[in-house]
Image (tube, helix red, strand yellow):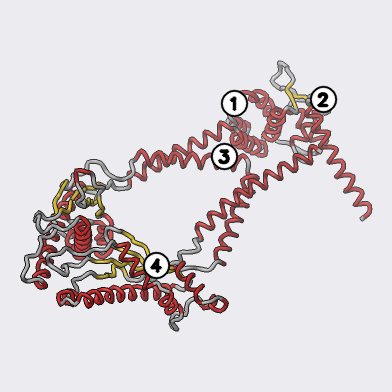
Amino acid sequence: MRRWIGLAAGLYPWSWRERYGVEFQALLEDVNPGWREFTDVLRGAVKMQMTNAATCWKLAGGLAVVGAIAATAVSFRIPRIYESTAVMRVTPHQDQQRQVSQDVFQWQAAHQLNQMEREILSRTNLEGIITQPGLDLYKNELSLEPMADVEQICYHDIRIRMVNQSSDLGAAPAFAVSFSYTDQQKAQAVVRKLTTQFIEQNLRQNRFQARVWQEIWPQSAPPPGPNLEVLNPASLPRQPINTSRLSFATAGLVLGMALGLLAAVAWRRPKWTLQMAGFAVGCCLLATAVSFMLPESYTSSALMQITPPLVPANPTREIAVAPPAERLKQMEEVVLSDTILEEIITYPSLDLYKKQREHKPLDEIVETMRRDLSIRLVSPSHWAFQISFSYPDPFKAQAVVRELVTRFTEENVFVERERARASGDAKSIEILEHKVGAALEVLDPASDPLEPVSPNRLAIALAGFALGLLLGMIALHFRQHRSHTLRTA
Amino acid sequence: MTDPALLILASLAGGEKHGYAMMEDIALFADVRLGPGTLYGAITRLEERGWIRPVEVEDRRKPYCITAAGRHYLEEQMTSLDQVVKTALRRLKHA
């Protein structure tokens, strides 16, 4: 037993042994060795190690190294992702006599790009790319998941974004097409395929527009559509785009060190740590309970797009274009008028703001509804705008958005019809009938909100936790101050 | 009373002692058997706070003595303990 006690004594910190080692050994020689003495020395060694500042740093350092090693190991398990990119540009046709103004060209180009994007990112096309024999993409994923899910993965791996136009690119809209994949060669091959598809799609759309033009204006030659050119062909990526292994290791190192320091504090001041944790958990629970008492709010959204006319009302004139914000504002004024909103609020099937209506006039309720409504341009270049409505009942929120989508569509048809009728021009009416005039398209119908947007329970709980820590610190400070004052008195 | 720090101070109030002598003295007057780890843990803390100090001798068994600050702290603790004891006894008598 004396040997075991000697071994346990060797576990005391080096600096402590330097100071007390000799006399401690002398004491151990004097006492009767037994299990009680052994456990007492062992417990003393552990306590001394943990109260030693150097040990705290050693623990933090040890955990930091463990964290760094674990993070590096994880980084080796994550496959390397490579991204190939090609840059393309839409340029106006070269026919000087039939060239449209810059605004109209931008509008046409944005619309054309949008159409091409939708066609290329369609599920059928993505399936074609995934299963192309030469590419044979997402082999592992296909063995585990259905094609529809793999198509979604592929959709997210393709990125089409507008490129900031430098002076050498001129005013022509340029965009980058990227694809991220674990194989460099395949990533490049997919981007090559996508650029080819964009060019083919552009030609197809130009031909379709020329045919529509011929139907309306058989006597005049249709203007050639915008050209699409490749500025930078698909790149062969050399470096992966994932977070580097060094960053992983650094993150693991920092996290490990933080955990180590936290553990050291908890060990050295267990009472203080427990009290702080008590305050934090208590406030967190209280905040969560409060969040469950707050009324829930669901938001339904729909995405609409103003589409430009395919043909002008007069073949010799360019297409008249009102800026998207202006056009949207005109429609918004009508659709969100007091009369229409009052009508929606009092629909028997909706019966919105029932309780508020009992003690508030209807015009105040209309203002409340306006605050719960949001209509904003999502992408001015693509002429898309989003309609959102937040309400405690998810089904009513969706029904309101559906109603507003219908109202916007009706308003657009009404405006176009009025314009055609006012002009008295048979061609304008024909354009309206062919549905090739300015139109309003629903990109995403009113969503069915499954989760409430407010209250954000996680954020409230976290805020409660942080507040608990702060309150704990203040309370412990005051208690310490009070006991010090009493002791002094 | 089982606080090792107070027991050591009380033992040293009677004169300087080395570790084993302290253990034996405490066992005698308080009927508490301190283990070697507990004893030296408390000695380390008391020396850090300046309440005890080692006496310079050539022997491996180093004796310790109580300092003025240590004596003051012990007096303070004993006074408050005395008050508690007196109050408790008085209340027990009247109960």
The residue lying at 65 percent from left, 23 percent from top is A22
Confirm or deny contact between disc 2 and disc 4 (CB under 8 A).
no
Q: Which residue is mark 4?
A: A388
Nearest-to-viewer mark from 1 and 4: 4
Label 1 to label 3: alpha-carbon separation: 18 Å
Q: Which residue is mark 2?
A: B15
Label 1: element kind: helix
Classify the position of the N terminus of chain A by image quarter. top right
Give amino acid for label 1: Ser
Badge 1: chain ID: A
**In the image as oriented, which residue stretches furthest toward the top?**
B58
Label 3 to label 2: alpha-carbon separation: 38 Å
| Labels 4 and 3 share a subunit | yes
Q: Which residue is mark 1?
A: A15
Give amino acid for label 3: Ala
**In the image as oriented, which residue stretches furthest toward the right?**
B94
| Labels 2 and 1 share a subunit | no
Along the horizontal axis of the image, is B9 left or right of A296? right
Label 4 to label 3: alpha-carbon separation: 50 Å
Q: Of marks 1 and 4, which one's residue comes earlier in the chain?
A: 1
Callout 3: few (<14), some (14-19), or many (20+) C-alpha neighbours within 10 Å? many
Label 4: element kind: strand
Badge 4: chain ID: A
Per the rendering, the mark at residue A264 is 3
**Image coordinates for residue A461, horizontal then vertical, percent:** 54, 57
**Image coordinates for residue A117, horizontal then vertical, percent:** 21, 60
